[in-house]
Image (cartoon, grey):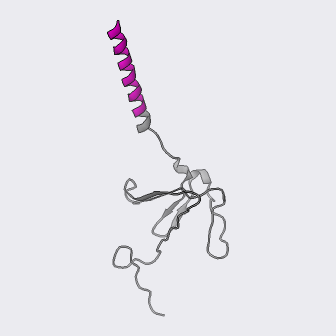
């Protein structure tokens, strides 16, 4: 009887660990609908599903656009390859007190990666 009780406890423990592992593996993570996606090329800004189609406020007259909901902040930045989204070049987490600044070069591509073609003299 004692061995049967230990066997049942052992099986129950293994099942509990298996269930916990399954829950960790199938965890969906964060809702991608909260993401605002900026794509390279011709600079395309795509609002996440949860923000609606008009997540950016109008231009402030100085070429700056801000999010409509001022309570939201950048908390994570992930840079992916457009052709292969599973390839992550950079991932960083941020808090409200220390927001990131992202600088993007938008120009006619030069000869090397990350370079711009020189502007023609006027």
Q: Main secondary structure of the magenta part?
A: helix
- Where does the image place residue 120, in percent across and percent down from the top left? 44, 89
Q: Is residue 91 left or right of residue 49?
A: left
Residue 15 horizontal/vertical position (percent)? 39, 24
Q: On the rendered structure, is 92 left or right of 47? A: left
- Residue drawn at (50%, 63%), measured in percent from left and top? 38
Which residue reaches farthest bottom?
122
Q: Residue furthest front?
A: 2
Magenta-span inclusion, residue 120: no
Q: Is 5 rendered above or below residue 29?
A: above
Q: Which of the 4 image quadrants contains residue 47?
A: bottom right
Q: Nearer the viewer, residue 45 or 115?
A: 115
Q: Nearer the viewer, residue 1 or 88?
A: 1
Picture coordinates of residue 117, whole percent (x, y):
40, 82
Q: Is residue 60 above or below residue 98?
A: below
Which is nearer the eye, 46 or 102?
102
Q: Is residue 10 magenta?
A: yes
Q: Is residue 45 left or right of residue 116?
A: right
Count of numbered marks = 0
Q: Residue furthest left?
A: 3
Closer to the camera in the image, 100 or 29: 100
Which region is colored magenta?
1-21
Question: Which residue is at a point 49% across and 71% down the rendered structure image?
Answer: 103
* Residue at 39% from the left image edge and 23% from the top image edge: 13
Does residue 74 appear left or right of residue 114 in this picture? Answer: right
Residue at (62, 54) in percent of width and height = 52
Q: Which quadrant, please, contains the N terminus? A: top left
């Amino acid at each position: 009887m004692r061995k049967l009780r230990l066997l049942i406890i052992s099986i129950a423990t293994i099942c509990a660990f298996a269930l916990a592992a399954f829950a960790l593996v199938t965890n969906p993570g964060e809702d991608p609908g909260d993401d605002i996606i900026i794509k390279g090329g011709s600079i395309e800004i795509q609002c996440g599903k949860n923000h609606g189609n008009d997540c950016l406020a109008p231009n402030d007259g100085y070429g700056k656009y801000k999010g409509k909901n001022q309570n939201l902040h950048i908390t994570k930045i992930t840079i992916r390859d457009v052709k292969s989204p599973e390839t992550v070049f950079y991932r960083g987490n941020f808090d409200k007190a220390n927001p990131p600044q992202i600088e993007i070069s938008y120009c006619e591509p030069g000869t090397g990666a990350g370079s711009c073609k020189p502007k023609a003299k006027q």
